[in-house]
């Protein structure tokens, strides 16, 4: 089979498939607020404990990237996506028949989240294996699917919940997840993907190019990706043979700038998913109707599409420093969070915040491929992106539960909540009174 060449031919079909994967992951990932409301109504448990299901799902969706890197190295991007789709579908189907919150946390937060992590991280990595000159633009286009999923499919999931109940709509989510198998079959192997497997199994200093080339990869294809190798001034510059996953992760983490990027992603998403999870409830507490709370998530999805596309277009040339752009977008998002108490009491102010949240929170992801290639090179691309997504997931896992220790999920007052003991919070929240 002829391998896909970067920036040409089937690479654009792979981009379309990655976009489809991101649409579904955007619906299931950043639409966790809808599932959170369903679990609150269905199990009548404490908000902090219930939030663990959504935060664990979002965390494993990102942390599952570590397994994606392993499967991609051993098999292919196609195998990782199809396996993740089947795991997600099985997990959602199990949630239909579960009657305890603990098992929902396990299956929805753990099993479904791990499957989503395989498909989500692979959808990012496969762009790096199919594009060179238009890498940042392609990443922005593919990841704009996240916003499209939040904008279009999240309201559909809400309607399905109202139609089929708090358990029956998990059947709908299982069917949506199964569609990821279709997109995964379109991930034909590329020259650059084959290149990473070759450099992982042969010593580059002891063998000639003729010995390295597989039957379907010529020397010109390898020469084309030589400029995407490790920089000589980084700790990885002397490494020649990534022998195992642990070996690769250890050496990637010796790169201090890369570690700082991972720390940046951790702290950013520690706060971002607190807002995604609680924004619909915050709107209801301040007097908005329940459906208006879900509209805020759709607004953030619309602005997320614009943000990711603009990020890809801005970094399509070589005139913009991607690290500086990452710092700028996250800084603006931080300022909007700090100022939220000043304008967030009205619904118009909440809509404005949703625009900021979507516009700047997702802009970092189109930059990951470019940053990873700049810091560690093509042979370590899958490992680097996997570690970055693990940092994102760790922040997501820690953020919402930590916030739940200090803020009542029903009336947004600081603990100890004066109403929770009498169960009035639930009544006030359901009726939509602030």
Image: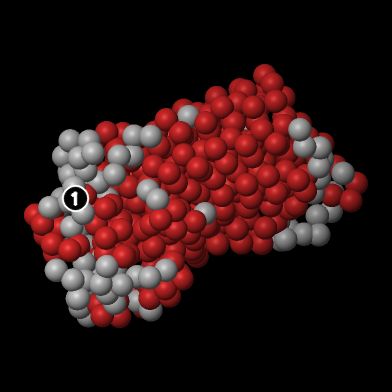
The location of residue 75, given as percent across then percent down, is 40, 51
Residue at image location 64% in from the left, 50% down from the top: 110
Q: Residue placed farthest to the right in the image?
A: 422
Q: Of 217 and 18, which appears nearest the observer?
A: 217
Give whichever of 272, 142 is nearer the camera: 142
Residue in front for this viewpoint, 47 or 256? 256
Q: Nearer the viewer, residue 345 or 51?
A: 51
Pointer 1: what residue?
215
Q: Is residue 201 left or right of residue 318?
A: right
Could you tell me residue 265's position as x and y percent?
44, 62
Q: Quadrant of the C terminus?
A: top right
Q: Residue at x 57, y 39 (%)?
A: 88
Task: Give the quarter of the image for residue 198.
Answer: bottom left
Q: Position of residue 188 (x, y in %)?
A: 30, 39
**Residue 90 visible in this rendered orientation of the protein:** yes
**Protein image colouring:** secondary structure
Q: Is residue 404 above or below residue 153?
A: below
Tell me the SS state at disc 1.
Answer: loop
Quarter of the image that includes the N terminus: top left
Residue at (38% x, 57% y) in the render? 73
Q: Is residue 218 found left or right of 275 in the rendered image?
A: left
Q: Residue at x 57, y 54 (%)?
A: 59
In the orientation shown, which residue stands out farthest toward the top? 163
Query: Within the image, what quadrant is residue 161 found in?
Result: top right
């Amino acid at each position: 089979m002829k391998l896909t060449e970067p920036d040409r031919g089937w690479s654009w079909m792979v981009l379309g498939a990655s976009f489809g994967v991101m649409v579904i992951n955007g619906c299931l990932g950043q639409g966790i607020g809808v599932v959170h409301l369903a679990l609150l109504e269905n199990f009548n448990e404490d908000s902090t404990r219930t939030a663990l299901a959504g935060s664990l799902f979002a965390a494993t969706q990102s942390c599952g990237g570590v397994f994606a890197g392993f499967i991609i190295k051993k098999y292919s991007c196609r195998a990782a996506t199809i396996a993740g789709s089947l795991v997600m579908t099985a997990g959602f189907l199990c949630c239909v028949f579960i009657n305890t919150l603990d098992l929902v946390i396990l299956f929805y937060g753990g099993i479904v989240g791990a499957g989503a992590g395989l498909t989500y991280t692979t959808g990012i990595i496969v762009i790096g294996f199919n594009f060179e000159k238009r890498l940042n633009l392609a990443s922005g286009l593919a990841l704009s699917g996240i916003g499209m999923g939040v904008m279009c499919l999240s309201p559909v999931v809400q309607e399905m919940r109202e139609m089929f109940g708090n358990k029956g709509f998990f059947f709908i989510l299982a069917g949506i997840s199964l569609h990821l198998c279709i997109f995964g079959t379109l991930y034909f192997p590329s020259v650059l993907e084959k290149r990473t497997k070759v450099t992982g199994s042969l010593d580059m200093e002891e063998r000639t190019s003729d010995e390295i080339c597989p039957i379907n990869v010529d020397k010109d294809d390898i020469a084309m990706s030589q400029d995407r190798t490790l920089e000589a001034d980084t700790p990885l510059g002397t490494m020649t043979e990534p022998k195992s996953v642990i070996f690769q992760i250890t050496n990637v983490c010796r790169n201090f700038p890369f570690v700082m990027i991972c720390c940046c992603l951790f702290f950013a998403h520690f706060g971002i998913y607190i807002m995604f999870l609680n924004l619909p409830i915050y709107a209801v507490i301040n007097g908005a109707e329940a459906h208006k709370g879900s509209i805020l998530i759709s607004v953030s999805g619309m602005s997320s599409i614009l943000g990711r596309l603009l990020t890809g277009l801005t970094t399509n040339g070589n005139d913009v420093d991607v690290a500086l752009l990452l710092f700028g977008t996250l800084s603006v998002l931080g300022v909007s969070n700090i100022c939220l108490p000043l304008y967030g009491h009205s619904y118009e102010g909440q809509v404005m915040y949703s625009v900021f949240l979507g516009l700047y929170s997702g802009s970092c992801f189109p930059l990951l491929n470019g940053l990873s290639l700049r810091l560690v090179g093509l042979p370590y691309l899958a490992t680097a992106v996997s570690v970055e997504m693990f940092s994102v997931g760790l922040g997501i896992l820690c953020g919402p539960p930590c916030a739940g220790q200090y803020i009542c999920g029903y009336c947004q007052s600081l603990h100890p909540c004066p109403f929770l003991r009498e169960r009035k919070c639930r009544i006030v929240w359901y009726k939509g009174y602030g």
